Image: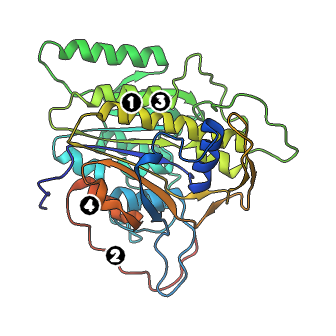
């Protein structure tokens, strides 16, 4: 496979799970009192379609995070529920695996459990997205990302301390432990020895805490109201995890690939809670700013900010000024087929102009030709 001469050395892919145009607008109106106020908005390139693989002649269904993540991670479409595999069960090479073969260091950061669909599509292969144990095994025995920062499942499915430690990973469970690991790695590298890190950050059961900590007073059931008992007294914010991951991966002699997911934007969309949605999007934008600050002055790095899909059918009705939540409506408790925004900075960013498909990220991130598309399925298959 020929790699283009102008391929990026470092790739930072920032995914706001469930973050459509209206989510960005709502967060900007709250944070800045106007549109265009989030860190990544000056780098708008276009929009991206997100549909998954559909049976031949059928209307494409609305995507889930597994199919959308697979498209971004591999440049190939698949069916909903599948993790970087074709419908026939063939493993598809991910951009993380591609970069690792080039000698680059790799990392995955998320606010949801590490074996959730989006991070899984970059570091694992599975026929079912709920195969959390198999996804964790793939991380630790096959793809072996250098950095894994996020939450974990309280009942022990997926990433666990024994699994990580048994695979040679250092396990850090608090912000202080994470920062201490980063400082230790920096001291070790000061003598000229650059050893690749292997660290699993298991910071909270269920999810990294909501950025908006006030009670949500609604009469309907909220599925994501009590997903964790963790607090930010010990758990790091997404911005802090991003900064730590960059400090570790930046020491790589051959460059790196880092995927950062604001996964709880999606969960806020499923519950139609604008307070959660706005605060999670703002924190995600701050994490993006952390990446932009790190890359400032560099000419070898690509930063892409986008989403896997929109969630909630959000529509901003009216701004109520800076520091106030805008008036909004929701049309769904699930994902929608709306196109999502694409922002990009750095090497190859101009290749993402206009309307693109989520499979179009692959050639820009890898500097290679897009993989051949799989044929459409001949008949409908029940999900």
Q: Residues within 10 Å of mark 4 (few under 14, many from 20)?
A: many
Position of the N terminus, as image quadrant, is bottom left
Q: State the residue at coordinates (60%, 35%).
A: 206
- Colour scheme of this structure image? rainbow
Q: Which residue is mark 2?
A: 374
Look at the image and tell me whether residue 111 can be seen.
Answer: no
Q: Which mark is residue 363?
A: 4
Mark 2 residue element: loop
Q: Would you place residue 180 above or below residue 75 in this image?
A: above
Q: Quadrant of residue 21?
A: bottom right
Q: Nearer the viewer, residue 221 or 364?
A: 364
Q: Which residue is mark 1?
A: 164
Total number of numbered labels? 4
Residue 290's x, y, as percent?
41, 31
Look at the image and tell me whether residue 208 can be seen.
Answer: yes
Q: Which residue is mark 3?
A: 239
């Amino acid at each position: 496979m020929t790699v283009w001469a102008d391929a990026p050395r470092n790739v930072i892919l920032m995914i706001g799970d469930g973050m459509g145009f209206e989510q960005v607008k709502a967060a900007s109106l709250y944070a800045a009192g106007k549109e265009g106020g989030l860190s990544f908005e000056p780098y708008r390139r276009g929009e991206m379609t997100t549909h998954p693989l559909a049976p031949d002649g059928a209307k494409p269904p609305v995507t889930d995070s597994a199919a959308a993540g697979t498209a971004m991670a591999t440049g190939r479409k698949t069916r909903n529920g599948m993790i970087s595999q074709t419908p026939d069960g063939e493993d598809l090479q991910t951009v993380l695996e591609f970069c690792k073969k080039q000698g680059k260091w790799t990392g995955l950061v998320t606010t949801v459990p590490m074996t959730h669909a989006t991070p899984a599509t970059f570091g694992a292969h599975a026929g079912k997205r709920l195969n959390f144990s198999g996804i964790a095994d793939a991380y630790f025995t096959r793809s072996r990302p250098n950095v894994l920062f996020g939450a974990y499942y309280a009942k022990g499915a997926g990433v666990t301390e024994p699994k990580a430690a048994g695979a040679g990973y250092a396990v850090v469970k608090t912000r202080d432990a994470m920062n201490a690991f980063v400082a230790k790695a920096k001291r070790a590298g000061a003598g000229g020895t650059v050893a690749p890190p292997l660290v699993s950050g298991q910071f909270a059961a269920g999810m990294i805490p909501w950025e908006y900590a006030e009670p949500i007073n609604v009469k309907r059931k909220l599925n994501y109201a009590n997903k964790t008992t963790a607090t930010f007294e010990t758990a790091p914010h997404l911005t802090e995890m991003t900064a730590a991951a960059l400090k570790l991966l930046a020491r790589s002699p051959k460059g790196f690939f880092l995927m950062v997911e604001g996964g709880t934007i999606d969960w806020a969309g499923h519950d139609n809670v604008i307070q959660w949605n706005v605060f999670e999007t703002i924190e995600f934008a701050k994490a993006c700013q952390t990446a932009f600050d790190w890359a400032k002055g560099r000419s070898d790095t690509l930063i892409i900010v986008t989403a896997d899909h929109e969630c909630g059918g959000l529509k901003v009705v009216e701004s109520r000024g800076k520091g106030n939540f805008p008036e909004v409506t929701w049309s769904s408790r699930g994902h929608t087929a709306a196109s999502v925004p694409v922002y990009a900075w750095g090497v190859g960013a101009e290749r993402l102009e206009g309307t693109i498909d989520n499979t179009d990220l692959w050639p820009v991130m890898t500097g290679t030709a897009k993989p051949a598309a799989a044929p459409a399925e001949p008949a409908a298959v029940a999900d």
